């Protein structure tokens, strides 16, 4: 059974002529990285926000671990929230500037993790939990006492990754996770994410406008345009003759 399966997902903003996300469907297997590529404005982030239930889809189904969550709210949605986490493009906006790194790392656990059976990041003590998380994202333990502005962009993004994985979700939505980083940090963060997927058995929906990054990270790729998935293929079929013309255009610019 897929860890996440989405069917017919559609989201139209008030006053818009056409849906930002239209009839999107896919299934994500355990341990898989599924790439989603498309140019700015094609609906990638809207899809991500619908999956996270930050926004409501107009219609369609979101099955997470076999549970339909598209229309759950409040108390009924809460038990499912831990299972899907997101890493956003901009780690500076994602971290509370007034919290030390240790407290930022603890926050998801306090909100959603208590009572969950954690295995890799079992909560034996506050310090051990934080140390283990920093280690997992290859950051030195002494960063725990610092504030976000005392870290580099790459280090901050590692902290948001640690926050996302510390409560052991099944699915992590990576929404342009390296777009704000320089090229060297981009490669290092992608390598880290790839390693975490394997070692923790995570499933990723990896969203990017960068076809090269998506191709490098993913086993399967979907191409989105105007809110719709217009092409999908296994990563090793990227250069196949029968690729959609639009995919070929994306290939020609990468
Ligand atoms: N809150 C909103 N209200 C109204 N329209 C929106 C809203 N957010 C996005 N849109 C519109 O929905 C469409 C899809 O936007 P979305 O941000 O999902 O695209 P994207 O592929 O993530 O783009 P980018 O890579 O630039 O973030 C665009 O036409 C955008 O203008």
Image (cartoon, rainbow, N blue to C red):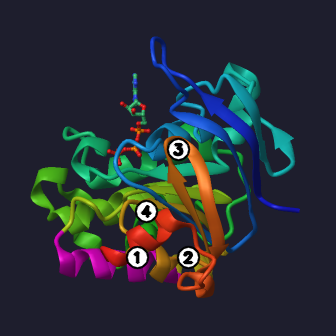
Query: Helix, strand or loop at disc 1?
Result: helix
Are the residues tagged 1 and 3 within 8 Å (C-beta)? no
**Residue closer to the observer: 199 or 243:** 243
Which residue is pictured at 68% across the width and 32% down the height? 78
Q: Is residue 64 left or right of residue 233?
A: right
Task: Locate residue 31: give its quadrant.
Answer: bottom right
Q: Earlier in the sequence, mark 2 or mark 3?
A: 3
Q: Main secondary structure of the magenta part?
A: helix
**Foreground label between 2 and 4:** 2
Say whether disc 1 or disc 2 marks the residue closer to the N-terminus. Answer: 2
Question: Which of the numbered marks, if any, corresponds to residue 48?
Answer: 3
* Residue 157 is one of the magenta-drawn residues: no
Residue 128 drawn at (x, y percent): 47, 67
Q: Secondary structure at mark 2?
A: loop
Magenta residues span 182-195
| Disc assigned to residue 218 | 2
The C terminus is located in which quarter? bottom left
- Badge nearest the viewer, 1 or 2: 1
* Label 4 or label 1, whichever comes before in sequence order: 4
Label 2 and label 4: CA atoms lie apart by 20 Å
Residue underneath mark 1: 251
Q: Residues within 10 Å of mark 2 (few under 14, many from 20)?
A: many
Q: Quadrant of residue 63?
A: top right
Q: Is residue 168 visible?
A: no
- Closer to us: mark 3 or mark 4? 3
């Amino acid at each position: 059974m897929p860890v996440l399966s989405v069917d017919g997902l559609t989201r139209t903003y008030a006053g818009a002529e056409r849906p930002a996300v239209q009839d999107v469907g896919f299934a994500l297997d355990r341990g898989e990285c599924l790439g989603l590529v498309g140019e700015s404005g094609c609906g990638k982030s809207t899809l991500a926000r619908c999956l996270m239930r930050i926004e409501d889809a107009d219609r369609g189904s979101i099955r997470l671990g076999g549970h339909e969550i598209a229309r759950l709210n409040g108390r009924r949605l809460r038990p499912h929230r831990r299972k899907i986490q997101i890493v956003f493009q901009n780690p500076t906006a994602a971290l509370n500037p007034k919290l030390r790194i240790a407290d930022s790392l603890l926050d998801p656990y306090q909100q959603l993790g208590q009572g969950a059976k954690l295995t890799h990041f079992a909560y034996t003590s506050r310090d051990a939990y934080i140390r283990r998380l920093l280690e997992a994202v290859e950051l030195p333990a002494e960063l725990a006492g610092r504030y976000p502005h005392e870290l580099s962009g790459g280090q901050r993004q590692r902290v948001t990754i640690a926050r996302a994985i510390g409560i052991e979700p099944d699915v992590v939505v990576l929404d342009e996770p390296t777009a704000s980083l320089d090229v060297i940090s981009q490669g290092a963060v992608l390598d880290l994410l790839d390693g975490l997927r394997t070692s923790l058995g995570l499933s990723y929906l990896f969203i990017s406008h960068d076809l090269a990054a998506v191709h490098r990270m993913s086993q399967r790729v979907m191409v989105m345009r105007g809110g719709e998935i217009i092409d999908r293929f296994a990563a090793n079929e990227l250069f196949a003759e029968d690729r959609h013309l639009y995919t070929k255009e994306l290939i020609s610019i990468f």
